[in-house]
């Protein structure tokens, strides 16, 4: 694969940059007969932001994206792009561009012709359209393949052509439906970084659908987590990871140990929480005295070989997996089986080894309100 280039060349693009547009949903519902695919959803994507719709299959995220595009029409509610009501407008009347999960390439056109197609139909000269297309093909890593037909490319290469074809249009709103699903892991990381850099360089408003939590955390300004046709939580990647609103979000965003605890006091911003006989302090998050559920991230648990000490629990290593940059453990403990990640350790603690367990309360542990 060719070396991916810097995006600084985009400033020389012959297309004038459009003003980024906001996207707003006001109590939008989409029904298919008796099935409600999206249920009274409201959110705003601010101009120039990349917002990811994240959730498991069937949660309504792709239907929501298709309603932004005008490929599905809302059953109820209102959709605005750039402050303009587009609820009843067709896809052709909205200044949006979409990268589909399927490739949707023109089989009779070359790679270059596929990518240059949008600017050409907008009236841009063939020379300028081809220059714009070549810039995007180089960014996506397909320089040198521009004369091939889609049938001569691998599935991953075809997907990258589809990404380049949407990027070249520089629309008010750019939509991505699982755009990296056919790329290998290393290439997924590189292409998502380039999509993010391109979005920021051109100040594009982007709605991005994925079921991949790591991908969402890496590229997003904000994430909208959907579950069962509704919004479970909206926030920055850090807010969702560190302050999950409920058990679903805590379990869905990254790995988390869901364990039981007890809040020992009633007032104040900081709560005294007991976990299996160990007392720690955590942000209260509005809960009172009594039983609570906690989301404990795998790297917020420390393991030490040897006997238990004050503020620690005893446990036993059940399984250890060396993964290069980290070691992953399954640990048996009085509060249940724990998934633990240690970074920078070369020699894993052997299974069967007694260990003490402690918690890094400054990060990675959150009370789950209402759980």
Image: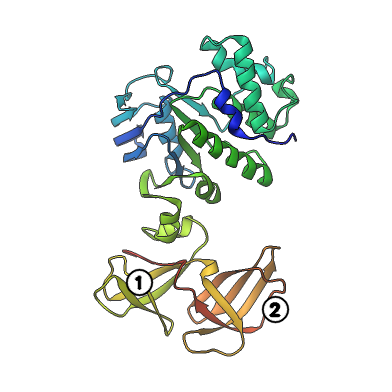
Q: Dot 1 surroundings within 10 Å: few (below 14), some, or many (20 or more)?
A: many
Q: Using the rendered image of the protein, determine whether residue 181 is visible from the camera's viewpoint.
A: no
Task: Say whether residue 27 is left or right of residue 20.
Answer: left
In the rendered image, the vertical position of residue 364 relative to residue 74, given as above or below? below
Residues 85 and 151: in front is 85
Task: Say whether residue 39 is left or right of residue 257.
Answer: left
Q: Residue at x 50, y 84 (%)?
A: 312
User: Which SS class for mark 2?
Assistant: loop
Residues 331 and 174: in front is 174
Residue 245 screen position, x and y as percent: 36, 58
Q: Residue at x 69, y 33 (%)?
A: 141
The first of marks 1 and 2 along the sequence is: 1
Residue that extends furthest to the left in the rendered view of this protein: 267
Q: Residue at x 36, y 46 (%)?
A: 231
In the rendered image, the vertical position of residue 142 relative to residue 301, given as above or below? above
In the rendered image, the vertical position of residue 371 relative to residue 267, given as above or below? above
Q: Dot 2 surroundings within 10 Å: few (below 14), some, or many (20 or more)?
A: some
Q: Which mark is residue 292?
A: 1
Q: Residue at x 29, y 70 (%)?
A: 269
Q: Quadrant of the C terminus?
A: bottom left
Q: Quadrant of the N terminus?
A: top right
Residue 47 screen position, x and y as percent: 38, 34
Residue labelled with disc 2? 350
Q: CA distance from mark 1 to mark 2?
A: 33 Å
């Amino acid at each position: 694969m060719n070396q991916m280039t810097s995006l600084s060349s985009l400033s020389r693009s012959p297309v004038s940059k459009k003003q980024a547009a906001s996207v707003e949903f006001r109590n939008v519902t989409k029904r298919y007969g008796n099935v409600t695919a999206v249920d009274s959803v409201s959110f705003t994507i601010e101009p120039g932001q990349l917002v990811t719709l994240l959730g498991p299959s069937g949660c309504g995220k792709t239907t929501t994206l298709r309603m932004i595009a005008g490929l599905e029409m809302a059953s109820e509610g209102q959709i605005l792009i750039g402050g303009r009501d587009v609820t009843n407008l067709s896809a052709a009347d909205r200044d949006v561009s979409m990268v589909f999960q399927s490739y949707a390439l023109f089989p009779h056109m070359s790679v270059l012709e596929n990518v240059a197609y949008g600017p050409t139909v907008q009236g841009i000269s063939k020379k300028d359209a081809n220059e714009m297309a070549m810039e995007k093909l180089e960014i996506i890593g397909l320089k040198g393949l521009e004369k091939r037909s889609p049938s001569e490319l691998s599935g991953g290469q075809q997907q990258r052509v589809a990404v380049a074809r949407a990027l070249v249009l520089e629309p008010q709103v750019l939509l991505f439906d699982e755009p990296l699903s056919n790329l290998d892991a290393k290439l997924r990381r590189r292409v998502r970084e380039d999509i993010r850099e391109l979005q920021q360089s051109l100040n594009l408003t982007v709605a991005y659908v994925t079921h991949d939590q790591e991908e969402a955390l890496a590229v997003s300004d904000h994430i909208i987590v959907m579950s069962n046709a509704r919004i479970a939580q909206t926030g920055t990647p850090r807010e969702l990871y560190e302050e999950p609103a409920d058990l679903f979000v805590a379990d869905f965003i990254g790995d988390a140990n869901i364990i039981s605890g007890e809040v020992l006091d009633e007032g104040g911003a900081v709560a005294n929480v007991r976990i299996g006989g160990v007392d720690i302090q955590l942000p209260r998050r509005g809960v009172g005295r009594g039983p609570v559920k906690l989301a404990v991230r795998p790297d917020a648990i420390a393991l030490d070989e040897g006997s238990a000490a004050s503020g620690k629990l005893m446990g036993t290593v059940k399984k250890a997996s060396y993964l290069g940059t980290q070691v992953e453990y399954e640990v048996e403990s009085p509060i249940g089986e724990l998934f633990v990640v240690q970074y920078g350790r070369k020699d894993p603690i052997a299974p069967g080894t007694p260990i003490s367990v402690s918690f890094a309360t400054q990060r990675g542990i959150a009370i789950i309100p209402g759980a």
